[in-house]
Amino acid sequence: MPRREHLLKIGVSGIRGVVGEFLTPVLVGSFAQAFGTYVGAGRVVLGRDTRLSGEMLQHAAACGLLAAGCEVMDVGVLPTPTIQVYIGSTRARGGLAVTASHNPPEYNALKMFNARGLFFNQYERAELLDLYHQSEFRQAANQDMRQLLADYQTPPRLHIERILAHVDAERIRARRFRVALDAVNGAGSRLSCRFLEETLGCQLHALFVDPGRGFPRPPEPRPEALAELVELVRREGCQIGFAQDPDGDRLGVVEETGRVLDGDEVLGLAVEAVLERAPGDVVVNLTTSALIEDLARRRGRQVYRTPVGEANVVETLLAVGAAVGGEGSNGGIIFPGVHACRDSYVGMALLLESMARSGEPISALAARLPRYVRRYGRAPYEHGRLGSLMQELEEAFPGAQTDRSDGLKLTLPEGWIHLRASNTEPVLRLAAEAHSEEELGKLWDSLTRRLGATASAAREE
Amino acid sequence: MEARKALRISHVGLRGVVGAGLTASHVLEFASAFGTFLEPGRPVLLGRDPRASGVMIQEGVAAALMACGHDVIGLGIVSTPVIQHAIRRLEAAGGVSIGASHNAAEWNALKFFGAQGAYLSTAEASELLDIYHLKKFRFVEWDRVGRFQRRDDAVDAYLDELARVFDLAALRRFKVVVDCTNGTSSLILRRMNERFGLDLLLINAQIEGVAFAHEPSTNQRTVALQLAPLVRPVGADAGFLFDVDSDRVAMATEQGTAISEEMVLPVLADYLLERGPGKLVITNLSTTALLEEVAAWHGGRVVRVPVGRQAAADALAGFRPEQIAVAGEGTGAVMMPQFRFVYDGIAAMLAILSMMRERGRKLSEILARYPRYSMLKGAVPLVSNRVPEMLMELRKRNADGAANTLDGLRVDWPGRWFHVRVSQTEPIVRVIAEQRGDPPERLFEALLDFVRAYA
């Protein structure tokens, strides 16, 4: 039997899918109306990234929100963190961002935020989903209809002001850093140029900063996608290169040597930068490198682990009052001083500030991070297979410390392995980390061997 | 059908009370059906009247059309005729007009137009309804989704076209009071004053989304409310009143007399048949018999069709444009061949003013020429399953008259007629009787009693 195409997902993470046959304006309009019903008849902020389907879906979301009696504040094309900061600092009931973040261009989705500009917690998300399924939306009559307004200027200004309150911009400006930027023609295209050039006084060499053009490379700022940026860094002798995803929440970093840092290294540098100035605990997801524990331990601080997903990390981060957090597995830096969300702008500012303070190149700062080797992969999802795989793995490593809060994570003296079902795609995600390549190879084999029939399909990422 | 829950999805589009009947889901799905129905390749136009719910509907329609691969051009708050003109001028694939015209503010509606701004034929509208009911919409791939563009030049282009047909400079001599009912006519007429130096004094000219200054219908009663009493004090030559989306018009004379909405079509038939003797007047079965008399003066002929825009559009398609002098209803909705048969209240006003100028007559003098007809209108709640029996019996009892059963039953005697039919918009039976001279009160009361016996 051929596999069913599964290109739409409506669940506790919201609504996401391939535009066209799957993600339709009808579904998005209904989901937005459910959202508007849930947050109540007040202002809702609405923005989007640069996906070709974004304008269409923003109109559909506006329709649903207005139908629920909400006032819609259109902020246009903006990075998701910028939208979140704006929601949190106005009297909005919540906000929606039309973006599928790092997913390929054919996808789109709604990211949903509460009145503080934060992701809904798991309980709120479940309530919203129930409301959507019950289809008992608030239906505003003509006299209850609110307006569709627009504010394109305030959100970027607010976001930059917030960041400047936490970094020493003078010090960064004084260095006139040569910086390369790859904004993937995404929502950050304009703001990133303005931020790096005008706010932080860098000599900017930018590519892919045309928001109307579509994505010129895979949208996730992973090392293999950043060849052009690496080339630019080398050609122009840049001291650092930054890469964003289409909605500007994830950050990729290229050293002056042309080496691309992985997400855990980027997060490690940001955590180090924050803890240096404002000590506190750290919250990361289960798939993030153990190097974060090493960094925190040096300063006598604790690390909390959460299931994968920004919403999970933020929920714990706020609950324990941590100083910093993130998801090393995907380049997300969360600094609640500015806003409790993944924010590539905070990341850029923190790294440039570390370079300015230390006077050292980014490669030297990265070299001082604790050393681990990591490997990530994915395998096609087979219903009913995850449970038995988890049992087999647990039996194979009887001495391991286990965590079943998101799939299965086994922590051993030589490293760890993590197996989980993706929240956004019909795949199993695999990850392993160890002190040496040899140990990593063994751990990876023990993981993929047990995938049995699907082992050949498990590919490294 | 409870009025608060009112929703009707039919050949002429969607109409309902927003929230209680007409929801965002209806809008998104019906507009998706329209996007599927239209041929891809050319843009689709979108405009609305000032009702607050219009923004919600506009956003939903835009999204659905874009998802079907159409570029959308938003014209903002404009009248229905402006949208229809812009469709033709911009060679668009079609358009959508969002606005409930003469209905109260809590209503809204969507009207759909094809290429050239034409109303959909019954066959096209049926196909659209089938697509809507099947809900298999042709959404395009992500990289072929349409874009949205705003245009603000539609009103000026429309005024240019009016200026080609009417000698606007010659109409500067008239002082005219206009009741805009807080609708789209105020934007158009203000601009007409600016560009062509007309002397149109606008009242209720504030664009309003929720509370109109008065009920937005174009009947004698609403003309008498605020407009008619103002005409003489300001020394105006005439008064005109538009509904919210400016497709209908009603009038008051220079003496401050509110005129029945039934008179708009006969006046224009008189004017246009004079310029095109022997042509046709297309109207529905409920419209005044004065038309036949006026047509006879100019050797013209009246073609009567069932009530409703759809029947009128289908009838128009059956003739060559040059055969027709004018088409319209007794509601003040009139289409003229100069404007490719678009219901257009503003064009109707300009035609009446031109007639006053050409004949050198005051409006009251023009109206005084017509023999007096008196019409009585009533409505009785409907029991659907007894309607055929009731009509059959009614026909039997009035066998001495000439019967027409195209739409309910109309029976004509010399100088007198009645029409009993089922409303397309409300669950009622409409009863209309007219007589040359005094009102046919006994006939009308007898009809009401008879129909009530079946309710």
Image: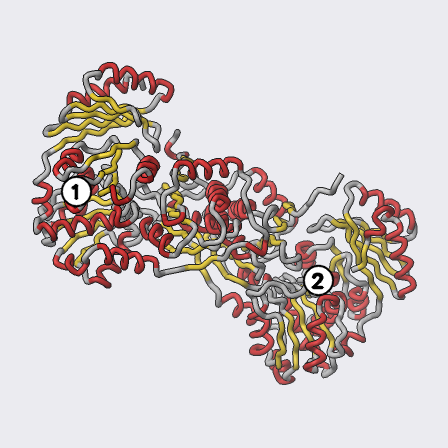
Q: Where is residue B199, by image quadrant?
A: bottom left
Tell which of B296 and B86 is nearer to you.
B296
Residue at the spot 18% in from the left edge and 57% down from the top edge: B167
Element type at mark 1: loop
Quadrant occupied by the C terminus of chain A: bottom right
**Chain ID for label 1?**
B
Quadrant occupied by the N terminus of chain A: top right
**Chain ID for label 2?**
A
Place of residue B400 in the rendered image (x, y in percent of width and height, measured from the top left): 19, 17
Q: Where is residue A442, by image quadrant?
A: bottom right
Element type at mark 2: strand
Crowd tier of the residue under label 1, counting other residues whose Cα lies within 10 Å: few below 14, some 14–19, many 20 or above: some
Q: What residue sits right under mark 2 in the picture? A: A326
Q: What residue sits right under mark 1 in the picture? A: B277
Marks 1 and 2 sit apart, C-alpha to C-alpha, by 82 Å
Tell which of A167 and B174 is nearer to you.
B174
Q: Is residue A138 in sight in this rendering?
A: no
Tell which of B121 and B233 is nearer to you.
B121
- The reply, left or right, for residue A227 in relation to residue B48 is right
